[in-house]
Amino acid sequence: MAAIGAHGALLDRGIRIPGDVALVGYNDVPLASRLEPALTTLRVPVKDFGRISAEMLIERIQTGRATRQRVILQPELIVRGSTV
């Protein structure tokens, strides 16, 4: 949402996107694809974050102990018009 606010502020000041500034957002909110130019964004696997967190919490409740785990979730770069 911060990148969407920056998008509007830049355009209001006559700064060209992507001509003068390349702009990238995070989390690929639905509005990102509707802007002009559309916002390049990093899409994160939010559902996987929730699922894995719930699984870890359930395991902790069932066993009474927390296990340390390293979880790596792969984001996806969605290239749109706000970058060259």
Image: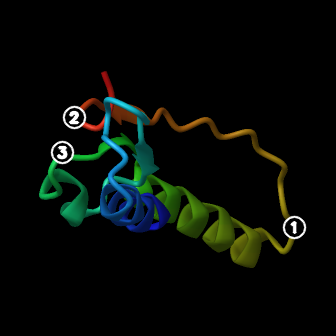
- At mark 2, the secondary structure is loop
| Numbered badge on residue 37 | 3
Few, some or many residues within 10 Å of mark 2 (<14, 14–19, 20+): some
| Residue labelled with disc 2 | 80
Q: Is residue 66 above or below residue 81?
A: below
Q: Earlier in the sequence, mark 1 or mark 3?
A: 3
**Residue 52: x and y, percent?**
54, 56
For numbered disc 1, what is the local secondary structure? loop
Q: Amino acid at mark 1?
A: Arg
Residue for badge 1: 65
Res. 39 mark: none
Quadrant in which the C terminus is drawn: top left
On the image, which quarter does residue 31 sit in? bottom left
Indicate left or right for 39 with 35 as reference: right
Secondary structure beneath label 3:
loop
**Do labels 2 and 3 touch, CB within 8 Å?**
yes
- In this rendered view, identify the residue nearer to me: 57 or 80: 80
Q: CA distance from mark 1 to mark 3?
A: 49 Å
Q: Amino acid at mark 3?
A: Pro
Q: Give residue 13's quadrant in the image.
A: bottom left
Q: Earlier in the sequence, mark 2 or mark 1?
A: 1
How far is the residue under mark 2 from the one under mark 1? 44 Å
Mark nearer the viewer, 2 or 3: 3
